Amino acid sequence: MSDFTVVSYHTNNFKCFAEGLVGDCERFGYPVYIKDVGYDFDDLIKAFDYKISFLREMILRFGRVLWLDIECRIVRPVPRDWLSPLISSYSMGRHVGLSSGVLMLSASDLPTIDLWLKYAEAYPLYPDDSVLDFLIHATDLEFSTVPFEFYDRDTTSPIVRGLWRNAYTVIQHPTVNRWPDPVKYKRAFNGKLNVNRSQAEEVSRQRKGIFFRNFGGDIGEIIEVMMSSQREMFVDSGWVFEPSTSRYAPQMFWPEDADDFNSKPVSFELSMKYFYTKPKGKTFREQAIRSMRLDSEDQKKYASTREVFSVLKKLKWSKLWFR
């Protein structure tokens, strides 16, 4: 019997993802609790921040919990060395960031959750994982981390940001849910849009990136078929393609939100290059972390005692043991 419970919640527009995660938990024998919130949030940051108080409730109810965003899928047993407190993380050059889409927490982490909730409420313009990133920078809080990968299909990271997998994949954390309104998510995580592009162009480019990061089939084959324009509509790996019109979309969003496959970036390699190109100056997350401050009470209670520290030193990278 598992010593943790998988927990998540969904709004009305994400209800379609719950069945997949529940089925995975049943297959691997993990207790699972999925809450139907019953409505959609009018603000994306509020939807993210709801997670924090929900996690507190779940820990009090179940003890040790594994939070997964509702769109996540479990494809292999969760390694036994995934111990709380644990969070997923990514590396982009010298920048290491956190993603709260995968979290393992227990009763001993309740003070951390309370602190997290306090500063999420104090800084409502920043996503919940940016706030937690700030707290790890500003305090002596320590998390074990499990890395995830956006593009490299040969990765040894146990978490992948798509519906593709390899021999090391434990959790798939896709982002196809962003397809209907990808610009909303870009604003939340990046703060602003490219002012040199039209709204339609920005949407199409964001969707093309979602395709390259998430598609689980043969991307090269799809590009070749779509460029030929000689085939009627077909479905591959949960996506719909119509070469005759150059339209495509995840199956759940077809045809209402179909888009132009010829939009940029035109190749997987270019998409990866653009994604990993560091912007001029500080990233939005780096600016957010620098702008947040502990209040005087928490400064005395939690402020880091280390004269020089970095998130790389403070985060304990988990060994990839697959048992």
Image (spheres, helix red, strand yellow):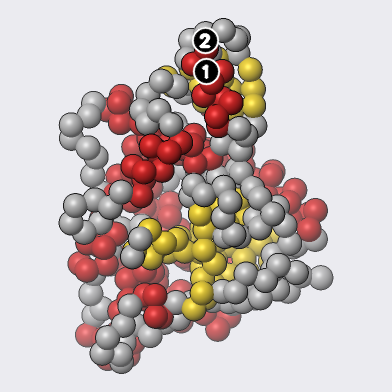
Judging by the rendered image, the residue that carries numbered circle 2 is 229
For mark 2, does the 10 Å Cα neighbourhood hold few (<14), some (14 to 19), or many (20 or more) residues?
few
The quadrant of the picture occupied by the C terminus is bottom right
Q: Which residue is drawn at 51% across and 54% down?
A: 149
Quick one: 250 or 40, which is closer to the camera? 250
Quick one: 164 or 87, which is closer to the camera? 164
Q: Residue at x 57, y 60 (%)?
A: 157
Quick one: 72 or 296, which is closer to the camera? 72
Amino acid residing under circle 1: Met
Residue 256 shows up from this direction: no
On the picture, is 92 further left or further right than 214? left
Quarter of the view holding residue 241? top right
Could you tell me residue 146's position as x and y percent? 54, 67
Return the mark for residue 226: 1
Could you tell me residue 163's position as x and y percent? 60, 43
On the picture, is 236 further left or further right than 212? right
Count of residue discs: 2
Could you tell me residue 268's position as x and y percent? 46, 36
The quadrant of the picture occupied by the N terminus is bottom right
SS for callout 2: loop
